[in-house]
Image: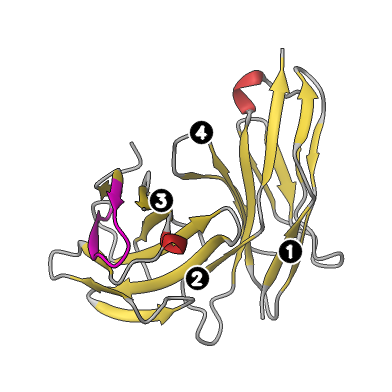
């Protein structure tokens, strides 16, 4: 079945450092890929998405490129802020067969940014 | 505010009891999804409804059931509760039945079984 693997955390950075969170996936067909963010005590918010190979999703300074050849969707940000501290989830949807609207999530990566 | 409303926000109950979690989808969305988030299992898909009909089922226990009503709100019923059912339960909604463009989550219901 479909699966998503994220780099192990937690990740601790200083403000203005460069961020990379790795995400790889296993899926048949042509899945859509997502990054969701969960701030403390809140629900998941869609951060960015890409629906086909070579698409780049971007939002709030975060970027990720859908790489079909390496089955990856790594999240990057050039300069993190304390307010970026949260849990980040990589996810995929694969609407073929009986999957319909199901999202398959990675295990999440905790990011802590210090001033 | 995401537009997806979940009630209650917190629920504490005893083992063996039954609870009902409620979700109102974002205006215009026809599909509702339920997820369970726990420390050991991560985010697990439970079930999806689209315009009142069950569309997909995931790792949902037989003690759990759900439905979507004509006004599109949904309820998740958890019965014979066990300590291991303690978790965050999220509802999400989307305008269609696919997740191709993602969907919108509510802020969750935290269930504690004691």
Chain where mark 1 sits: A
Observer-nearest of A12 and B112: B112
Q: Mark 3 points at which residue?
A: B105
Secondary structure under tag 2 reads: loop
Residue A91, percent across and down?
62, 59
* Residue at far top of view: A115
Judged from the image, the secondary structure of the residue bearing numbered disc 1 is: loop
In the image, the segment drawn in magenta is B11-25
Identify the residue at horizontal 30%, vertical 43% (top origin): B9
Chain that bears disc 2: A
Residue B75 lies within the magenta run? no
The single residue placed furthest to the bottom in the displayed view is A97
Tag 4, which secondary structure? Answer: loop
Q: Is mark 3 on a helix, strand or loop?
A: strand
Neighbor class of circle 3 (other Cα within 10 Å; few <14, some 14-19, many 20+) is many
Location of mark 4 (residue): A40
**Pair 1/2: label in front:** 2
**On the image, which quarter does residue B82 sit in?**
bottom left
Residue A15 seen by the camera: yes
At label 2, counting other C-alpha atoms closer than 10 Å, the crowd grade (few under 14, some 14-19, many 20 or more) is: many
Q: How far apart are marks 2 and 4 (CA)?
A: 24 Å
- Same chain for the residues at labels 1 and 2, yes or no? yes
- In space, the residues marked 1 and 4 are separated at their CA atoms by 32 Å
Residue A90 vertical position relative to residue A61 in the rendered view, above or below: below
* Marks 3, 4 in one chain: no
Mark 1 and mark 4 lie on one chain; the one further toward the N terminus is: 4
Q: Of the numbered discs in the image, which one, if any, rests on residue A102?
A: 2
Q: Cα distance, mark 2 to mark 3?
A: 13 Å
């Amino acid at each position: 079945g479909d699966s998503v693997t994220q780099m192990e955390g937690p990740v601790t950075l200083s403000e203005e450092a460069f961020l990379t969170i790795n995400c790889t996936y296993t899926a048949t067909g042509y899945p859509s890929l997502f990054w969701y963010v969960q701030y403390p005590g809140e629900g998941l918010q869609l951060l960015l998405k890409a629906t086909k190979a070579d698409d780049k999703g971007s939002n709030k300074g975060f970027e990720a490129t859908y790489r079909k050849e390496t089955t990856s969707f790594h999240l990057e940000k050039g300069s993190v802020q304390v307010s970026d501290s949260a849990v980040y989830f990589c996810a995929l949807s694969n609407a073929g067969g009986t999957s319909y609207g199901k999202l398959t999530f990675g295990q999440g990566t905790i990011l802590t940014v210090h001033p | 505010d995401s537009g997806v409303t979940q009630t209650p926000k917190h629920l504490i109950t005893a083992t063996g009891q039954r609870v009902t979690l409620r979700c109102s989808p974002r205006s215009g969305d026809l599909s509702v999804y339920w997820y369970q988030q726990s420390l050991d299992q991560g985010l697990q898909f439970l079930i999806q409804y689209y315009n009142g009909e069950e569309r997909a089922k995931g790792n949902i226990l037989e003690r759990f059931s759900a439905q979507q009503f004509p006004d599109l709100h949904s309820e998740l019923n958890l019965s014979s509760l066990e300590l291991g059912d303690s978790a965050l339960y999220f509802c999400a909604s989307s305008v269609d039945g696919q997740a191709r463009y993602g969907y919108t989550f509510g802020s969750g219901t935290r269930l504690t079984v004691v």
